[in-house]
Image (cartoon, rainbow, N blue to C red):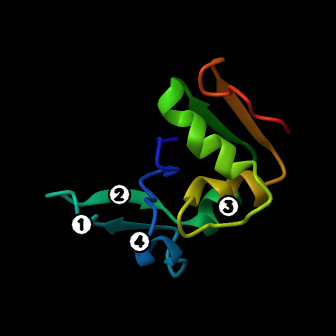
Amino acid sequence: MGGDGHTASLFPNNKDNLNDKHSCFLLKNHFDDFQRFTLSFKTLLSSQKIVFIATGENKNLALRKIFSKNKDYNNLPAQKLFLEHPNVELFCDSKAFLNINI
C-alpha cells in the first residue's frame, strides 16, 4: 500500500479503477510515462485473502483515513479492499500504525 492509499496500481482519483468489465487491465496515471498492469477490484475482491504491507510514517495518514468512519474509495482505493473483503491481513510497523485505533 502506498502513502496515498493506492494499492495494486489502483491510484486515487483514477476513473479507470472502477473498470470491472475485465479481470485485469492496463491503465496510465497522469504522473506516469508508462502503462501499468493491474487487477480489477472485482478480481481482487474474489481472492481468498488480501495481504497489505505498510511500513514507515509516510503510510500513517493513509492508514488513519482507511480506518476512519468515512468511506472514500475514490481517494483511498485500498480502503475498498479493507472494508469489503472478509479476509484482510495487515503487516505494518509501529510508525505506520501510530495513533490508530481499530
Between 13 and 80, the one lying in front of the other is 13
Q: Amino acid at mark 2?
A: Phe
Q: For mark 2, what is the residue?
A: 37
In the image, taking residue 25 as reference, residue 52 lies left or right, namely right
State if disc 2 and disc 3 touch (CB < 8 Å). Answer: no
Left or right of residue 94, residue 14 in this image? left
Element assignment for label 2: strand
**Mark closest to the chain's N terminus, 4 or 3:** 4
Mark found first going from the N terminus, 4 or 1: 4
- Which mark lies nearer to you, 3 or 2? 3
Disc 1 secondary structure class: loop
Question: Which amino acid type is shown beneath numbered disc 4?
Answer: Asn
Dots 2 and 4: beta carbons under 8 Å? no
- Residue at image coords 24%, 66%: 30
For image coordinates 20% across by 57% down, the residue present is 32
Residue where numbered disc 1 is placed: 30
